[in-house]
Image (cartoon, rainbow, N blue to C red):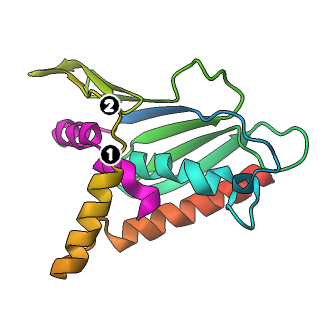
Amino acid sequence: MVGFNRRFAPQVRKMRELLAGVREPKAFVMTVNAGAIPQEHWTQDPQSGGGRIIGEACHFIDLLRHLAGAPIVSHHVNAIHGGSGPVDRVTITLGFADGSIGTVHYLSNGHRAFPKERLEVFAGGRVLQLDNFRRLRGYGWPGFTRMNLWRQDKGQDACAKAFVEAVRTGGPSPIPLAELLEVARVTIAVARSAQA
């Protein structure tokens, strides 16, 4: 559950609500300026931390899966290789069952002054742009232009509360098991392809 919290962020809930009315395929562009981490850091170790694709990029694969609302049917990876150690500069392209496409640019070679996370969604002649889980802007959406938060909210608290409530009441998982397994399978495949 921890790796799939972004779908519980307030702006993501709003995006999902707006996108529910779009009946044509969508295009997602996720840019993650992840920052450099030394190769000897535990998150870079495939044995202890799983590497950055499994440990971090999974969040964004899940986010696009959630917003598309359709299973991932294809994936392709381009990676920047150089030096030894895990790869943490990749472009992941996803295809979804409804014809939507998504790209995750997960990059460790940017500058820290540049924003960390930006998602753009192009759908039905309209655009949504989410910056750092603080500001959501809509272009061409009737009745919606923006949603701003005072502080960043990536959905961790709401995710934990939804999980605890499901356990307490015996209700269904807040995220269907099939989606969790699907995203995990795709993420592992992406990580393997990036290392090749």
- Find disc 2 in the rendering and name its residue: 151
Residue 137, numbered label: none
Q: Residue furthest right?
A: 83
Residue 38 higher or lower than 175, as above or below: above
Task: Name which residue lies at 23% across and 44% down.
Answer: 13
Say whether marks 2 and 1 touch (CB < 8 Å): no
Q: Identify the residue shown where x is 24% and y is 43%.
A: 16
User: Disc 2 and disc 1: Cα gap in Å?
Assistant: 22 Å
Q: Position of residue 107 (x, y in %)?
A: 65, 34
User: What residue is disc 1 on?
Assistant: 67
Q: Is residue 141 visible?
A: yes
Range shown magenta:
1-25
Question: Which residue sits furthest left?
Answer: 143
Q: Amino acid at mark 1?
A: Leu
In terms of depth relative to the viewer, which is nearer, 110 or 142? 110
In the image, 154 versus 182, the foreground residue is: 154
Q: Position of residue 22 (x, y in %)?
A: 21, 37
Q: Nearer the viewer, mark 2 or mark 1?
A: 2
For residue 108, above or below residue 84: above
Task: Judge left or right: residue 160 versus residue 94.
Answer: left
Membership of 180 in magenta stretch: no
Q: Residue at x 40, y 65 (%)?
A: 1
Counting residues from the start of the chain, the first of labels 2 and 1 encountered is 1
Give the amino acid type for the residue marked by disc 2 in the picture.
Arg
**Local SS, label 1:** helix
